[in-house]
Image (cartoon, rainbow, N blue to C red):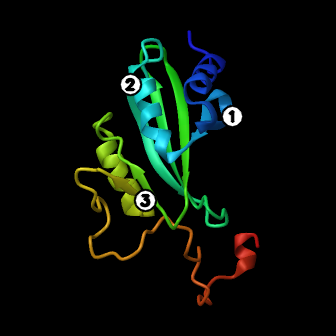
């Protein structure tokens, strides 16, 4: 059975300073890497004779508007079906350079997940075979999951805050 410690030590040995911020929320091995090492790390986990992390469970984006130089994160969840082991890999990107290589060459399922992440966050996946909106209309000129918009319409007068526990 694989342990978080075993995988973390192996990744540190292979990728050195390019892997950092190890955590284990709820027992899930979570780490951060660089944009340049994201795909090599996914390939390493996929082809590793012991780890066999051959299933991309999820790929998504997160917007942190107050984190200067690290405003966006791309998060990969990979799973070893052989060992029932999961790992979460995060890559932080600056809003001024919101590009990351595509994982579609390794995981076919990354195709739609990357399109959805682009559609809602505007993260550009370099080398993606068909990076266009998947759920929103093409004419949309913004990305709705970015935290750039107020949560409520401040002009509404029909809501009484006391009724909403405020």
> In the image, is 98 to the left or to the right of 25?
left
Question: Residue 47's x, y, as percent?
Answer: 38, 21
Image point (28%, 58%), residue name: 134
Mark number, residue 123: 3
Q: For mark 1, give the secondary structure.
A: strand
Q: Which residue matches tag 1?
A: 23
Q: For mark 3, give the secondary structure.
A: loop
Mark closer to the chain start, 2 or 3: 2
Q: Depth check: give the residue in front, 105 or 164.
A: 105
Give neighbour class at mark 3: few <14, some 14-19, many 20+ (Cα, 10 Å). Answer: many
Question: Residue 163's x, y, as percent?
Answer: 71, 75
Mark closer to the chain start, 3 or 1: 1
Q: CA distance from mark 1 to mark 2?
A: 22 Å
Task: Determine whether label 3 and label 1 are within 8 Å by CB.
Answer: no
Image point (49%, 39%), residue name: 37
Q: Is residue 111 above or below residue 96?
A: above
Give neighbour class at mark 2: few <14, some 14-19, many 20+ (Cα, 10 Å). Answer: some
Mark number, residue 139: none
- Write down the quadrant of residue 4 in the picture: top right
| Residue sitting farthest toward the top | 1
Image point (55%, 35%), residue name: 88
Q: Is residue 28 above or below residue 146?
A: above
Mark closer to the chain start, 1 or 2: 1
Q: From the image, which quarter does the C terminus lie in? A: bottom right
Q: For mark 2, give the secondary structure.
A: loop
Mark number, residue 54: 2
Question: Residue 86's x, y, as percent?
Answer: 52, 26
Q: Depth check: give the residue in front, 21 or 1.
A: 21
């Amino acid at each position: 059975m694989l342990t978080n410690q075993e995988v973390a030590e192996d990744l540190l040995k292979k990728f050195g300073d390019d892997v950092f911020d190890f955590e284990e929320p709820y027992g899930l091995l979570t780490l951060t890497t660089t944009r340049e090492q994201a795909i090599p790390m996914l390939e390493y986990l996929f082809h590793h004779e012991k780890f066999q992390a051959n299933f991309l469970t999820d790929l998504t984006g997160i917007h942190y508007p107050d984190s200067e130089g690290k405003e966006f994160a791309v998060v990969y969840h990979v799973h070893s079906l052989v060992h029932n082991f999961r790992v979460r890999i995060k890559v932080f990107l600056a809003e001024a350079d919101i590009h990351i290589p595509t994982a579609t060459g390794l995981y076919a399922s990354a195709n739609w997940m990357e399109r959805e992440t682009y559609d809602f966050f505007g993260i550009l996946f370099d080398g993606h075979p068909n990076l266009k909106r998947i759920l929103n209309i093409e004419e949309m000129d913004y990305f709705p999951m970015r935290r750039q918009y107020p949560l409520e319409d401040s002009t509404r007068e029909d809501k009484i805050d006391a009724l909403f526990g405020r």
